[in-house]
């Protein structure tokens, strides 16, 4: 397993098991019930992507990077349209871009 997949898996597990931690403690935005559910789904996606790309070839990494880029774009739109979630959406977009860059490397 490469460092990117280890970091992605750890991040996914933290979102899945403790959705309040990143948003609530680090960003200062306590997620509501709906946001908590979305965070868990995204955590599961990160965990699954880490497992699927751990031993995969270049094509799988490019697909994963594309998924990350689309996720970043959706978070940028959310940050622009929803002031309540602006900080967490912007942070999520930045992280998704970092993951995308790692996948396309």
Image (cartoon, rainbow, N blue to C red):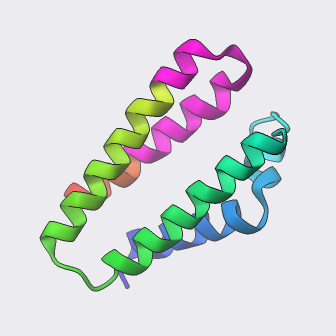
Q: Quadrant of the C terminus?
A: bottom left
Q: Residue at x 85, y 38 (%)?
A: 30
Give the side of residue 44 with respect to residue 1, left or right.
Answer: right
Taken as a whole, is the magenta stretch helix, strand or loop? Answer: helix
Q: Residue at x 57, y 36 (%)?
A: 91
Q: Residue at x 76, y 55 (%)?
A: 19
Q: Position of residue 69 (x, y in %)?
A: 32, 42
Q: Which residues are magenta?
A: 77-97
Relative to 25, residue 90 above or below: above
- 57 part of magenta stretch: no
Q: Position of residue 23 (x, y in %)?
A: 75, 43
Give the side of residue 90 with respect to residue 66, left or right.
Answer: right
Relative to 81, residue 102 above or below: below
In this view of the protein, which residue sits in the foreground, 64 or 90? 64
Q: Quadrant of the N terminus?
A: bottom left
Relative to 6, residue 71 above or below: above
Q: Residue at x 65, y 34 (%)?
A: 88
């Amino acid at each position: 397993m490469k460092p990117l997949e280890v970091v992605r898996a750890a991040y996914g597990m933290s979102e899945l098991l403790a959705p309040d931690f990143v948003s609530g403690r680090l960003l200062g935005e306590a997620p509501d019930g709906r946001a908590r559910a979305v965070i868990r789904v995204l955590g599961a996606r990160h965990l699954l992507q880490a497992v699927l790309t751990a031993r995969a070839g270049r094509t799988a990494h490019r697909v994963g990077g594309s998924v990350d880029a689309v996720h970043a774009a959706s978070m940028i739109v959310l940050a622009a349209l929803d002031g309540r979630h602006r900080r967490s959406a912007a942070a999520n977009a930045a992280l998704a871009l970092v993951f995308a860059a790692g996948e396309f490397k």
